[in-house]
Amino acid sequence: ASSMGLGNAKKYHLFLVVGAMIAAIAYSVLNYSSLWNFLYVISFPLFIYQLFRIIKIKEEKLLDPFLKQLALTTLLFTILFGVSLILVIDIKF
């Protein structure tokens, strides 16, 4: 964040998180077979909550605690996405 500046770092973070959400939804829509495809959407409120909190930050050093939160939320997203794929495979067979 220090080399980009706080404003650009926030924009970049927003782009990455929202872009990942859109990509995941697009994948699920294109490969739709049941509502289980969208199980990972349960994690979206956590991402959105973090984005709103990050937007309000005025100092770069206050961004540090969000790295751990983002990593844990991403882990939850990944697990839910993987489980949704497994459930969809079981449904197809």
Image: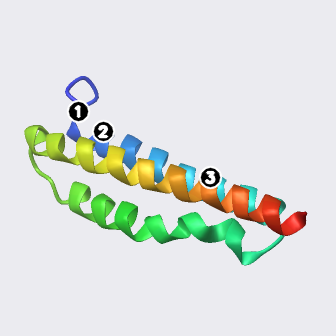
Q: Position of residue 33 (x, y in %)?
A: 84, 70
Q: Amino acid at mark 1?
A: Gly
Contact (CB < 8 A) between labels 2 and 1?
A: yes
Quarter of the image with the C terminus in it: bottom right
Number of the front mark, 3 or 2:
3
* Residue drawn where x is 13% and y is 39% of the image: 60
Number of the front mark, 3 or 1:
3
Q: Position of residue 88 (x, y in %)?
A: 77, 64
Give the SS element for disc 3.
Answer: helix
**47 vs 8, nearest the viewer:** 47
Q: Is 36 placed left or right of 91 in the picture?
A: left
Q: Amino acid at mark 3?
A: Gly
User: Label 2, on which residue?
Assistant: 9
User: Label 3, on which residue?
Assistant: 82
**8 vs 67, nearest the viewer:** 67
- Which image quadrant is residue 35 in? bottom right
Quarter of the image with the N terminus in it: top left
Q: Amino acid at mark 2?
A: Ala
* Residue drawn where x is 11% and y is 50% of the image: 58
Disc 3 from disc 1: Cα separation: 35 Å
Tally of numbered tags: 3
Q: Name the N-terminal-most of marks 3 and 2.
A: 2
- Which image quadrant is residue 81 in? bottom right
Q: Position of residue 42 (x, y in %)?
A: 49, 71
Q: Is 80 placed left or right of 5 in the picture?
A: right
